Image: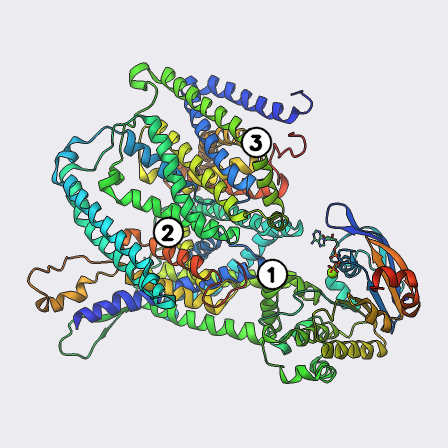
Amino acid sequence: MNELIFFINKVLISGSIIGSIYALGAIGVTLVFGILRFANFSHADLMTSGAYLSFVFAALLPGLGPVIGLPTGFVVLPLSILFLAAFAVTIDVMFYRPLRKRNVRPVMLLVASLGVTLMLHGVIRLFAGTSPRTFFAEQNKDVFRIDVPFETTTRDLIISEPQVLLIITTIICIVSLHQFLTRTRLGKAMRAMSDNSELALVSGINTDKVVQATWVIAGTLAAIAGTLLALDVVLKPDLSFNLLLPIFAAAIVGGIGRPYGAIAGGLLVGFSETLAVFNWSVLLRPFAEYFPEWVEIPSRLNFVPTEYKIIVPFVILIAVLIWRPTGIFRGQVI
Amino acid sequence: MNFRRYQREYLFFASVGVAVVLIVLNFGDAYALRMLAEAACYAILALGLTIQWGYAGLFNAGGMGFVAIGGYITMLIAFPVNHDFWGSEGAAALGEFLLEMLVVVAVVIGITQIHRIGIRGKLKVILILIALVIAFFVFNNQLVPVARLIERESGFIGGLGLPVMLGWIAGGLAAAFVAYWIGKACLGLRADYLAIATLGIAEIIKAILKNADWLTRGTLTVSPLPWPVPTPNDIGFVAARAAYLALTAILVAVLFVLLQRAYRAPWGRMMRAIRDDEVAAAAMGKDINLRRLQMFVLGSGLIGFGGAVLISFSRIFDPSGFTPLKHTFLVWVMVLVGGAANNLGAIFGAVAVYIIWLMGEPIMLFLFENVRLYGSLWFDWQAPDDLMARALQARVFFIGLTITLALRFVPNGLIPERIGRIN
Amino acid sequence: MLINAINLVAGYGGEPVLRGVNFAIDSGDIGVIVGPNGAGKTTALKSIFGLIRLSKGSVQLEGEDITNVPPDRRVRLGIGYVTQERNVFPSLTVRENLEMGAFIRKDKFSPVIDNMFELFPPLAQKADDVAGQLSGGQRQMVAIARALMVSPRLLLLDEPTVGLSPAFVSEIVDRILTIARSGVGVLIVEQNAKRALEIADIGFVLASGKNLFTDSGKNLLNDPEVAKSFLGG
Ligand SMILES: Nc1ncnc2c1ncn2[C@@H]1O[C@H](COP(=O)(O)OP(=O)(O)OP(=O)(O)O)[C@@H](O)[C@H]1O
Ligand SMILES: [Mg+2]
């Protein structure tokens, strides 16, 4: 039974954590892709910026967390969301809108987003350096150990406070996004523009406003995902490209322009990663006696060594591009 | 070639010339020669990217990966033979492993032909997927002990001790080979998908080279890489670098002439037609994806080749030294600033941007030394210890800024494509 | 005049597609633009709606110059436009499609939606179906209804009956007549020239970006030259 608990800790819990992060990132990417028609390479750095914003706010208001009883980095999240959303809109006005007005090919916007991501890179490194930082220098990270009521188990299910917060926040985000997209006029206009932007213009939809709303949502989700990821692991500046690939893979698996697809894609990529790096010999060892003599269970038995984890989203991405480029949920853009 | 028509070109190249003279005077000729030799290597990379982006409108965000392949293959081919390895059990184990893999591959290929015995559709896809997963599982778990054995006994497998030039060519071919498979999967789709896939493959290649110590010595690095011309140890820095520069300059010139001819030939005209109006070109019955694949493979091959030349010049194979910034985005800036669909523009961009990039280092240090000084004088500000390191890291900001500014204000680059005048 | 487009010159970067064309119709009138493929009919509607920039000429709506007004503002001024292709939002429901048509309305528009369901009864049953799954004719109805949601003064229709079965064609034509009778000016581009000119108060025959003939529908139908070259004899 201990092995099973180990499996749950390592695969189910870790998988849903990282899957939630990917899902939140992928929603942002897929909305921008659906509406502005380009793969936003700066999204991962937007997430990192969000995490650093939270770090700054947490440093400015250190007493806030203990008062409420939650990690300070989480409590200041509304502030970072506000700033990052405004920041995302500003970036659009400064770097993307002028190109859009010139009616350039969408891939030019992709190049511009590369430029933006490099600038964010530079700014973060200049102000924060490259060394990792933690949100929990002055506050303890609560870890919940849940005892499993079986006689044979000695291990506990382990989940940390930031992880619980992440899962709850993700669910809240998804539900509110769903409400927004299906109930509000602006949300429906977003779906409409993602369907057919020229027709949206012809219908009199204020496309500038829709674009702004898209960036606000992308910024909001980026701030949440970035901060919660940093709370769970550590805060460091070079997440960028390692995060970008799984997020894109998730968005494409789900179908571009399909937020629900992005959620499914994020979880799929997250679980695939944890399953792929999981050491399967742990699960086989209890059955060692049933194997023939000459079979020796190696100490490590995994699909992909942890160092090569990035192969997993890549393989998923390529497989989808070959077999079903519109993704599971039949996305708009191919 | 009259002066008025090519005024722009003369002007820009003349200013590069002036910059080089200033650098020779300030930093000495060994430094200037190193800079120019590296710039020439970058010119090859920029030409490769120009083929992809400028001629064909393909977005390759994985330059680093192809540079790394080129660099690794050169090391493998040209680095002296590691006799320890060939005499050890590791060699035999590796041979055995390769044979096993041959069997695995044969089985997988067999399963892809399973429709011949009547199994098709979903079932076939599922079987293939299962086979692939199992094959990968076997591959991964068989490789680990072999790799450990090699690492323990002899460090790494070493090189083959063959001529360097052969390594460069093989490096280009290997990069082209990888590009072929990526291109096949992505080229029928939007440009964005190729960008994402190339970004991914670059990171994967780097991860492999960094972690497969039995192939690359990983973080221990491999040096000194051999040169096709006498090395500094033989004839001193200035002469050796001058020789290397001469060689790379000749390479750039030859590539330039060849590409220029291809550009004017019907083939080049067709490529431009596809880039500018895909629909019309498709209507003319061109197989667009095939043409694009050609361009992508050719461009990536050149990038691999250029990478091989660049890494050889540095004399050290260090997998951690491959960074998206230096080997992907710097080249992008060169092409965007120089002029996307213009070989001359790419070469100009490579040299000019590389000079600016290198000069950015002392400039940033100078600036931030002052920031530290006046910050503490005027505001009593205690600068962080790593301020200088941060300042250098922050150069990436200017790379990004240049990209966005170039897109906005000189969308065709400083030396734009000369359609119509070219014939 | 409800709409007066004077001497339009416009194109897509290269040679101009429209080389000085004129259109004018009154409220409640049906104007029909006919002409061979590639004559510039769609381009003409786009210019009137402001989707492409004019290099020469002007557009006036009830005497007011709107040449430089962007398209979304023209919707507010009361111009509805149904494009030739891709004219519904496929992943939105029929009702949501209509709501998008009413995006600029600040008032309660559910009565307007009910009016549309009255005008196009087949849509009422499909109100909560996704538009991408409708038949071609139903989709065309959604598109027209969407454009009518702002209660426009002028309705631009680009080939509203193309590819529809005869029953649907009569139904759509019928609706267009109803719409015009309510005082809306309608400018239609049509392939099926004969049928369109029958209901036209005024017809414009376009070829190579120029007005070839402009006359009442009846006169054009009876004009032997028009008949010879555009109505298939
Ligand atoms: N987006 C565009 N970019 C460039 N050229 C265009 C574009 N749209 C149309 N054209 C060109 O403009 C000309 C007129 O096109 P337009 O669509 O106005 O014709 P049309 O009369 O509506 O034809 P049809 O009856 O086939 O709909 C054609 O030669 C076409 O090639
Ligand atoms: Mg048309």
Label 1 environment density (alpha carbons within 10 Å; few <14, some 14–19, many ≥20):
many
Between label 1 and label 2, give the one nearer the viewer: 1
If the image is split into quadrants, where does the N terminus of chain C sit?
Answer: bottom right
Task: Report whether C37 appears left or right of C139.
Answer: right
Q: Please, is residue B241 above or below residue C101 in the view?
A: above
Image coords of residue A17 (percent x, y): 35, 65
Task: Report whether B115 appears left or right of C229.
Answer: left
- Residue type at tag 2: Lys
Camera-side residue of B197 and C153: B197
Asked which secondary structure carries label 3, the reply is helix
- Residue type at tag 3: Gly
Q: Earlier in the sequence, mark 1 or mark 2?
A: 1
Residue depicted at 85% across the width and 69% down the height = C197
Counting labels gives 3
Q: Is residue B304 visible?
A: yes
Give the CA separation, mark 3 to mark 2.
38 Å
CB atoms at circles 3 and 2 under 8 Å apart?
no
Give the CA separation, mark 1 to mark 2.
30 Å
Using the image, tell me which numbered label, if any, was put on residue A211. Answer: 1
Using the image, tell me which numbered label, if any, was put on residue A236. Answer: 2
Between label 3 and label 2, give the one nearer the viewer: 3
Asked which secondary structure carries label 1, the reply is helix
| Chain at tag 3 | B
Q: Ligand 2 is located in which of the four quadrants?
A: bottom right
Q: Label 3, on which residue?
A: B345
How are the colours assigned in the image?
A: rainbow
Give the CA separation, mark 1 to mark 3.
35 Å
Image coords of residue A36 (percent x, y): 58, 58
